[in-house]
Amino acid sequence: MVKKKRILVTGAAGKVGKVVVKDLTSHGYDVFAVDRDFKEEPDMPNMTAELTDFGETLDALSSIGEDVYGRAEMKAFDAIVHLASIPHPREYSDAETFSNNMVATYNVFEAAKRLGINNIVWSSSETLLGIPFEQSAIESVPVKEDVKKLGSSTYAITKVLGEELAEQFCLHNPDMKIACLRLSNVMEEEDYKQFPSYNEDPTKRLWNLWSYIDVRDAAQAIRKAIETEFKGMATFIITNDNTVMEKPSEQLVREYYPNVKITGELTENQTLLSNEKAKRILGYEPQYDWRNFVK
Ligand SMILES: NC(=O)c1ccc[n+]([C@@H]2O[C@H](COP(=O)([O-])OP(=O)(O)OC[C@H]3O[C@@H](n4cnc5c(N)ncnc54)[C@H](O)[C@@H]3O)[C@@H](O)[C@H]2O)c1
């Protein structure tokens, strides 16, 4: 019997984690959920672990299912999805955000290396592209993966340095793959109610060039990043195809970023944070357009 692929998801109790776990399970994966704070008892094998503690991280990542499966079912993890993090600037003190996010990410990468788990997907963030854009000097749109990283908050700095960490791990471990997904601002369906108000005042979403990512599309991108075979570290911007606005993207750029160059042709509401690389390499295809959820 071919055993199902086993995937450990950190931050599984969070906004993105909950949907990732559901998406992976419904696509035939055996999921092991890890978080330090499960508000509700998960309906799958899980462990409460503090990932800033290396011992706990190593224990979680080396779990072969001895507690939940029969002997014949035990199996090491095929992949890790690492989402556990303080997800916003200034929710906690900067020093706490830095130490939590950096130490947990180091511990997960290091434990994976020691255990020979070479397939890792990690949630980076759009923030390292220079957000808030009205304060940084973007030269052209759509913004692509190759812009210089700029961490304007401690949170964003943890994403800049997390990507550096990922790169170093992969340089020293040629079999390792770490896909760093630069997620845009994550939206749940009920968030779409407020989208029409952005049209009345486009300055509300100037800071991230009017981008967003539906949480279900983020989960799809994460699954596809697990399934795409490559070695080394790679970054992908993960956005939906369109902006949060009704106004055409070209018009928004001309009005609000008059000195920014438009490269190529922009279709009507095309995202200004390009998801072209994720589509081309991962086969990512966003499905959830906010317009379909607003009456
Ligand atoms: N929400 C967004 O708009 C957004 C945008 C871009 C990137 N991201 C990234 O996506 C990931 C998931 O974000 P989210 O919105 O689901 O956040 P969330 O706060 O809803 O979930 C994060 C989970 O991680 C857990 N966690 C945090 N530190 C931990 C630790 N040291 N040990 C164990 N568990 C820990 C928390 O308990 C929480 O359940 C994060 O890496 C975040 O930086 C989120």
Image (cartoon, grey):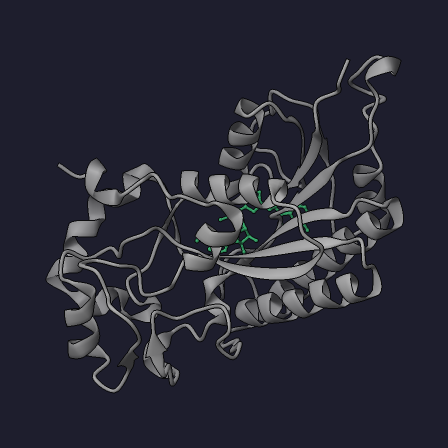
Q: Position of residue 277 (x, y in %)?
A: 47, 58
Tell me if residue 284 comes above or below residue 165 in the rendering. Answer: above
Asked if 42 appears above or below 121 in the picture, the reply is above
Horizontally, residue 265 falls left or right of residue 75, namely: left
Would residue 89 appear left or right of 1 to someone viewing this image?
left
Q: Quadrant of residue 12?
A: top right
Nearest the viewer among 190 and 250 is 250
What residue sits 21% from the left and 48% below the top?
194
Residue 14 seen in render: no
Q: Position of residue 203 (x, y in %)?
A: 21, 70
Instruction: Give the vertical position of 43 relative to 133 (above or below).
Output: above
Image quarter of residue 199: bottom left
Tell whether 37 sits left or right of 294. Answer: right
What residue appears at the point 21 percent right and 74 percent down from the top-left corner?
Answer: 253
Residue at 82% from the left image edge and 55% from the top image edge: 110
Visible in this render: residue 16? yes
- Quadrant where the N terminus is found in the figure: top right
Residue 107 x, y percent position in the rendering? 78, 55
* Residue found 53% across the figure and 23% down from its top: 26
Between 229 and 216, the one nearer to me in the picture: 229
- Residue 87, given in percent of the width and then of the height, sits at 52, 56
Give the tally of numbered discs: 0
Q: Is residue 293 left or right of residue 108?
A: left
Quadrant housing the C terminus = top left
Residue sitting nearer the eye, 86 or 65 = 65
